[in-house]
């Protein structure tokens, strides 16, 4: 099966199985083409900075789309097969995201620290000339380089594993024939639109649970003032217990605060991929995904800065600088939430609003490639 669009007559009579098979064939083919490139790139890039490279990026894109399709339209497939496939794809996705995640986090944190420590057109940064800035930068660089090196070794080992070979075999079989249920023989619109609508219903419910009113001010700093609401019990006691307890409380409170936003990002991706299968445009969802991607990267970077600030035997000046970097990233988190809240009410209301948009490419046509 090729990636070429169906004719108008073929598209009008396409079954749900035809559409799903067409998309799965295209993405499984992309997976199999990208896999050897990604394995070669991982093996050839010790110490390289530019990750993910083209093969790894293409592989990540295919993995996300196959997993998203199997989640949203899983009711059209043999259930045990769909569940096993999603589990293996999620494993590979998390594996491939490790090293690029550390690279982006390093660039974000070191760039933020350099900006705070430098001189901008509007004047010097708040850490300009601070004695702790060079040591804080060196500490972050060292810890993130070590984490990235460990991630690289893990990825390199797993990309040679029997588990990956088994997943590749599964994708090879998928190119030939997907294990569809008899219900997939129905007309595409009748079978697929209700399943796509469920993805948008989940997204709408998730977005309604976000504290959008609280996020209505840019750089409000609200998240920095709402800590200490979680009180986990810590084993043991000692003079350091209050400080440790406070750090754990803050980490737990921020993680709980971030969780619904991270969940909505997953729901946005699933809705994006559902629209691609339905041939609808998804520019607005692409933008929301980008905003929530910045939210997640800033939140992860803040956790890294906070963890580094608790490194034993660092100077108070170094810890102070890392605290400032942590606060800077938390403000970036709130800026992303503000951007999401400004954009969300402007989008089509409910699943019907999205799925009533005329198809951009038509049933049965492979959507134009996206980058994430």
Image (tube, rainbow, N blue to C red):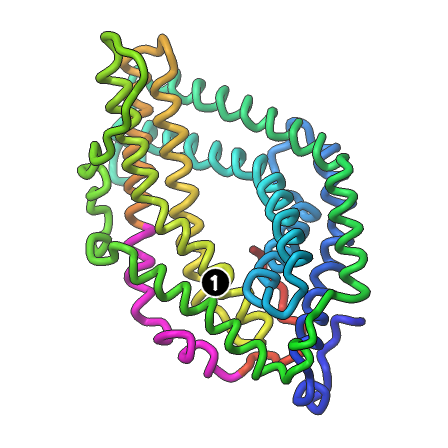
Q: Residue at x 44, y 23 (%)?
A: 140
Q: Regarding mark 1 in the picture, which secondary structure is present there? A: helix
The quadrant in which residue 110 appears is top left
Q: Residue furthest bottom?
A: 9
Q: Position of residue 157 (x, y in %)?
A: 71, 30
**In the rendered structure, does residue 338 fall within the stretch colored magenta?**
yes
With respect to residue 310, does 368 lie above or below? below
- What span is in magenta? 336-358
Q: Is residue 129 visible?
A: no
* 365 vs 254, nearest the viewer: 254
* Residue under the point 41% across and 48% down: 294
Is the C terminus in the top left, top right, bottom left or bottom right quadrant?
bottom right
Place residue 251 in its image quadrant: top left
Q: Is residue 20 above or below residue 363?
A: above
Query: Image point 81% across, 65% down: which residue?
Result: 176
Judging depth in this view, the residue of 43 and 75 nearest the camera is: 75
- Note whether 241 is above or below 169 in the view shown: above
The x and y percentages for residue 39 are 74, 40
Q: Residues within 10 Å of mark 1 (few under 14, many from 20)?
A: some
Q: Viewed as shown, does residue 237 lie left or right of 271?
A: left
Q: Position of residue 55 (x, y in %)?
A: 70, 47
In this rendering, position of residue 268 left or right of residue 133: right
Mark 1 — residue? Answer: 286
Point 69% across, 80% down: residue? 185
User: What is the chief secondary structure element of the magenta stretch?
Assistant: helix
Q: Is residue 180 magenta?
A: no
* Quadrant of the image containing the N terminus: bottom right
Q: Position of residue 100 (x, y in %)?
A: 57, 39
303 vs 34: above or below: above
């Amino acid at each position: 099966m090729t990636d070429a669009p169906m004719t108008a007559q073929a598209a009008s009579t396409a079954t749900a199985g035809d559409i799903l098979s067409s998309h799965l064939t295209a993405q499984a083919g992309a997976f199999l083409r990208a896999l050897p490139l990604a394995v070669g790139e991982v093996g050839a890039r010790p110490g390289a900075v530019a990750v993910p490279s083209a093969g790894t990026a293409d592989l990540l894109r295919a993995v996300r789309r196959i997993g998203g399709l199997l989640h949203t339209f899983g009711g059209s497939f043999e259930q045990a097969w769909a569940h096993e496939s999603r589990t293996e794809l999620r494993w590979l996705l998390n594996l491939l995201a490790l090293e690029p995640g550390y690279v982006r986090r390093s660039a974000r944190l070191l760039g933020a620290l350099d900006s705070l420590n430098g001189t901008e057109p509007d004047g010097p940064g708040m850490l300009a000339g601070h004695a702790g800035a060079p040591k804080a930068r060196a500490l972050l660089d060292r810890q993130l380089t070590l984490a990235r090196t460990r991630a690289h070794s893990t990825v390199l080992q797993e990309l040679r594993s029997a588990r990956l070979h088994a997943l590749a075999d599964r994708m090879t079989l998928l190119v030939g024939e997907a294990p569809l249920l008899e219900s997939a023989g129905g007309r595409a619109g009748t079978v697929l639109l209700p399943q796509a609508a469920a993805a948008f219903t989940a997204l709408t419910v998730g977005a309604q649970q976000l504290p959008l009113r609280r996020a209505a001010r840019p750089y409000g700093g609200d998240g920095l003032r709402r800590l200490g609401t979680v009180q986990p019990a810590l084993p043991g006691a000692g003079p350091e217990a209050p400080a440790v307890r406070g750090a754990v409380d803050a980490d737990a409170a921020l993680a709980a605060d971030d969780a619904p936003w991270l969940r909505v990002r997953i729901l946005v991706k699933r809705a994006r991929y559902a629209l691609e299968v339905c041939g609808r445009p998804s520019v607005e969802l692409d933008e929301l995904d980008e905003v929530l991607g910045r939210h997640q990267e800033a939140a992860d970077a803040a956790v890294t800065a906070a963890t580094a600030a608790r490194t034993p035997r660092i100077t108070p000046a170094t810890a102070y600088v890392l605290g400032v970097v942590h606060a800077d990233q938390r403000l970036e988190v709130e800026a992303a939430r503000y951007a999401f809240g400004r954009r969300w009410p402007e989008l089509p209301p409910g699943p019907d609003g999205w799925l009533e948009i005329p198809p951009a490419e038509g049933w049965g046509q492979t959507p134009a490639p996206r980058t994430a």
